[in-house]
Image (tube, grey):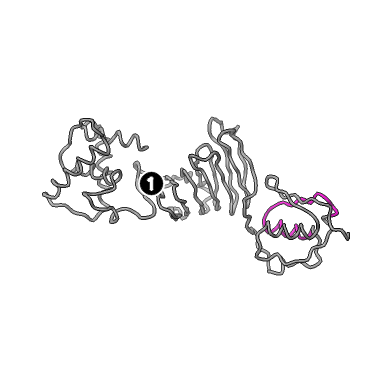
């Protein structure tokens, strides 16, 4: 249920036009909201609070249109819950006792949980299957209170990092607009802001399947398999998927010892072979003269592209990123 449908349901409830099923849903929802507070009211307080509640409900939810006030504590509970969500106050008191300070987490419809990070810092959310999510500011996810027997499915708007607990029987699926990201167990980042022109998925560990869904049958979906240090960018306008490398590749397979990244009289071919194994990235040396040059240096604790700068400078070469591959080209060492 989206915000518009929810507002309409509130109007129906206050006007006495709800079906029995809608009445029951409103009752359960309002009691669940009010159950989070330790505030209590006497009968006299209820009357005073009630006047304030109906005044604010009229202003925040129904505007100036006439409506029928439904009396009784159930009606008051529902109206109070609306104020908790829309007005942010309870009879002039801050909601500090009742709301989370980092992320607003609530059940938006029966069986569904939505987390909206309205704070200025990332928020970690642990899911019941043992997976966890780091939700960035101005981002929102929704997911079922209990995952199904066949899949674990979430919806993301914004940016989040996912560390997924492996479960071969239940793929972990994240829906982001026109893209679906599916994994069994891995860690990855998704950026999918409504106002952005593209959706981006980057993999830290494991393998991720990314494919589009809008207007496509299962047999004609455009998609890719991503591995660590690779990312995919989906252009919303052109509907194209572009694979590339992440901006700061990390070592996927650490060398056995620090001396493995200390090179003494090693050919460029040997150096790039070691880097390729460590980062899981393909290096293509286009000129055999460059490939046979010798390199001496300590590449420990340096970012990949800094390592490449040092290597290429020493052998009179340059590098270029093309998709998910790094190409090395140049005239090579002068003394070869």
Q: Nearer the viewer, residue 232 or 256?
A: 232
In which image quadrant can residue 72 be found? top left
The residue shown at (55%, 51%) is 188
Residue ID for mark 1: 113
In x, y percent, where is residue 177?
A: 50, 38
Element type at mark 1: strand
Q: Answer whether residue 158 is visible to the viewer in this image.
A: yes
| In this rendering, position of residue 237 left or right of residue 96 | right
In which image quadrant can residue 79 be found? top left
Q: Quadrant of the N terminus?
A: top left
In x, y percent, where is residue 267?
A: 81, 61
Q: Nearer the viewer, residue 78 or 205?
A: 78
Q: Nearer the viewer, residue 145 or 126?
A: 126
248 w.r.t. 298: above or below: above
193 w.r.t. 66: above or below: below
| In this rendering, position of residue 291 left or right of residue 1 | right
| In this rendering, position of residue 259 left or right of residue 31 | right
How crowded is the residue under tag 1: few (<14 C-alpha within 10 Å), some, or many (20+)?
some
Q: Answer whether residue 228 is visible to the viewer in this image.
A: no
In x, y percent, where is residue 146?
A: 40, 47
Residues rendered magenta in the picture: 269-289
The residue shown at (68%, 45%) is 323
The residue shown at (82%, 62%) is 294
Residue 215 lies within the magenta run? no
In x, y percent, where is residue 106?
A: 35, 47
């Amino acid at each position: 249920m989206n915000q518009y449908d929810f507002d309409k349901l509130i109007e129906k409830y206050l006007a006495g036009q709800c079906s029995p099923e809608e009445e029951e849903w409103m009752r359960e929802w309002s009691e669940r909201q009010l159950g989070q507070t330790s505030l209590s009211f006497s009968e006299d307080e209820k009357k005073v609070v009630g006047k304030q509640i109906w005044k604010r409900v009229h202003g925040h939810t129904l505007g100036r249109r006439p409506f029928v006030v439904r009396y009784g504590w159930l009606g008051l509970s529902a109206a109070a819950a609306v104020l908790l969500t829309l007005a942010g106050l309870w009879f002039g008191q801050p909601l500090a006792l009742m709301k989370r300070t980092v992320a607003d987490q609530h059940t938006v419809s029966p069986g569904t949980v939505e987390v909206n990070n309205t704070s200025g810092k990332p928020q970690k959310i642990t899911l019941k299957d043992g997976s966890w999510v780091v939700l960035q500011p101005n981002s929102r996810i929704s997911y079922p209170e209990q995952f199904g027997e066949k899949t674990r499915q979430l919806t993301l708007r914004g940016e989040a990092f996912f560390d997924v607990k492996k479960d071969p029987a239940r793929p972990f699926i994240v829906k982001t607009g026109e893209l679906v990201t599916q994994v069994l167990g891995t860690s990855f980042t998704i950026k999918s802001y409504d106002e952005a022109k593209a959706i981006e998925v980057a993999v830290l560990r494991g393998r991720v399947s990314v494919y589009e869904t809008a207007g496509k049958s299962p047999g004609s979906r455009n998609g890719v398999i991503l591995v660590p240090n690779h990312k995919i960018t989906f252009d919303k306008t052109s509907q194209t998927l572009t694979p590339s490398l992440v901006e700061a590749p990390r070592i996927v397979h650490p060398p056995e010892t620090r001396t493995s990244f200390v090179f003494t009289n090693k050919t460029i071919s040997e150096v790039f072979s070691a880097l390729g194994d460590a980062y899981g990235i393909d290096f293509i040396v286009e000129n055999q003269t460059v490939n046979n040059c010798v390199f001496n240096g300590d590449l420990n604790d340096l970012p990949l592209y800094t390592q490449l700068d040092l290597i290429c400078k020493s052998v009179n070469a340059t590098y270029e990123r093309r998709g998910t591959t790094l190409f090395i080209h140049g005239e090579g060492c002068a003394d070869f």
